[in-house]
């Protein structure tokens, strides 16, 4: 399969076969992540981030370094020419001269698609407003597969902010390519974006509820998300849903023994720290998986793995 030169704007750009190929490539990266490689020697990654990030930016950077390449970029556009009024298209047409591949995080929906139109080198969407976060969805799928050995046949629940959370949009699209049952758990004001719901309902069985306790006993994978405070147009609306869900040991009393709890992180208060030491908690292993998935993406898009 040839991924060389492709952009990743949306997870919807991929077929199930392509996603499986990516996940298998990520698995093959596990030993290289441990001992390093010079596969991408001489290649440069530019991380251009217009929004805060810890994991996405550092894991792309670490992935590039582990494969022998280098990374440049900025984590705060306040210190760049954007501050002087430069637009995204011009920034991209500048950065492409310095690098072989770009990751872009931006507050505007459609930013990655726009950047890809202007860029001669591959653009990876590292988060586009409340719209999508396709590489996180790949990390999530990889984690599910590694923890449960399969994706098909599982009952997956997405919990929290399904309206403003971008990771759940990409993940819902991706999961709908598998034979799963999906439950969407959120307050009424934070229900899954209708366009995403419409698209996935044609492919898999989906149900919506506000009641987390009720769905816990039959759930195989619980994907918990943070309520995206910064994306609410009105903070009074945020105040109404703040703390809507909190997964603690009491919540887990009725859960399956082999339930897997995922979270893209950062966590605020939606998973109690007491859950961290349970066998069900996968979210810190999920962070590690971010490295191998991103190593695979860089190697495939730069044509070093076919
Ligand atoms: C998420 C994001 O930026 O969308 N973080 C991540 O990349 N793992 C989730 C969030 O901010 O809640």
Image (cartoon, rainbow, N blue to C red):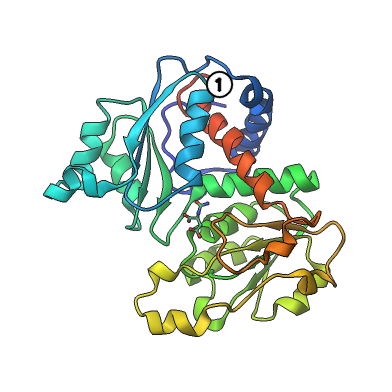
Residue 32 image offset from top left, x and y in percent = 63, 22
On-image quarter of the N terminus: top right
Q: Is 199 positioned to the left or the right of 127 in the image? A: right
Residue 150 image offset from top left, x and y in percent = 78, 46
**Is residue 132 at all visible to an observer of this figure?**
yes
Residue 272 image offset from top left, x and y in percent = 67, 67
**Residue in front for this viewpoint, 262 or 274:** 274
Q: Quadrant location of residue 107?
A: bottom left
**Residue placed furthest toward the front:** 274
Q: Residue at x 41, y 37 (%)?
A: 7
Q: Is 98 positioned to the left or the right of 186 in the image? A: left
Against 77, residue 188 (above or below) is below
Query: Neighbour class for label 1 at 10 Å: few (<14), some, many (≥20)?
Result: some
Q: Residue at x 66, y 48 (%)?
A: 284
**Residue in front for this viewpoint, 208 or 287:** 287
**Is residue 3 at all visible to an observer of this figure?**
no
Q: Is 105 positioned to the left or the right of 265 in the image? A: left
Determine whether the residue tagged by mark 1 lies in a helix, strand or loop: loop
Q: Residue at x 61, y 69 (%)?
A: 270
Q: Residue at x 63, y 40 (%)?
A: 288
Q: Is 36 positioned to the left or the right of 235 in the image? A: right
In this figure, what is the number of numbered marks? Answer: 1
Check mark 1 vs ligand 1: CB closer than 8 Å? yes or no. no
**Residue placed furthest toward the right:** 257
On-image quarter of the C terminus: top right
**Residue placed furthest toward the left:** 84
Q: Which residue is mark 1?
A: 305
Against 29, residue 115 (above or below) is below
Q: Quadrant location of residue 278?
A: bottom right
Residue 44 image offset from top left, x and y in percent = 38, 24
């Amino acid at each position: 399969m040839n991924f060389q030169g492709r952009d990743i704007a949306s997870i919807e750009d991929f077929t199930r076969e392509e996603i499986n190929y990516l996940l298998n490539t990520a698995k093959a990266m596990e030993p290289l992540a441990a001992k390093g490689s010079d596969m991408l020697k001489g290649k440069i990654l530019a991380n251009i981030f217009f929004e805060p990030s810890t994991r996405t930016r550092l894991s792309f950077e670490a992935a590039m370094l582990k494969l022998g390449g280098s990374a440049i970029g900025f984590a705060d556009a306040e210190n760049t020419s954007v501050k002087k009024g430069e637009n995204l298209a011009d920034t991209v047409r500048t950065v492409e001269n310095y690098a072989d591949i770009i990751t872009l995080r931006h507050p505007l929906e459609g930013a990655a698609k726009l950047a890809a139109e202007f860029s001669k080198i591959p653009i990876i969407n590292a988060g586009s407003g409340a719209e999508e976060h396709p590489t996180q969805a790949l990390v999530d799928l990889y984690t599910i597969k590694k923890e449960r050995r399969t994706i098909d046949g599982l009952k997956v629940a997405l919990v929290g902010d399904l309206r403003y959370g971008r990771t759940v949009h990409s993940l819902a699209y991706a999961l709908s390519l598998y034979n799963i049952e999906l439950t969407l758990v959120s307050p009424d004001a934070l229900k899954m974006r209708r366009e995403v719901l419409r698209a996935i309902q044609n492919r898999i069985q989906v149900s919506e509820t506000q009641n987390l306790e009720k769905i816990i006993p039959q759930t195989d994978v619980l994907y918990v998300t943070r309520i995206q405070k910064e994306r609410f147009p009105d903070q009074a609306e945020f105040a109404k849903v703040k703390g809507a869900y909190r997964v603690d040991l009491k919540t887990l009393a009725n859960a399956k023994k082999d339930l897997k709890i995922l979270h893209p992180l950062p966590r605020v208060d939606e998973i109690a720290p007491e859950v961290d030491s349970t066998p069900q908690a996968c979210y810190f292993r999920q962070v590690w998986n971010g490295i191998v998935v991103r190593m695979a993406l860089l190697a495939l898009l730069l044509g070093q793995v076919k």
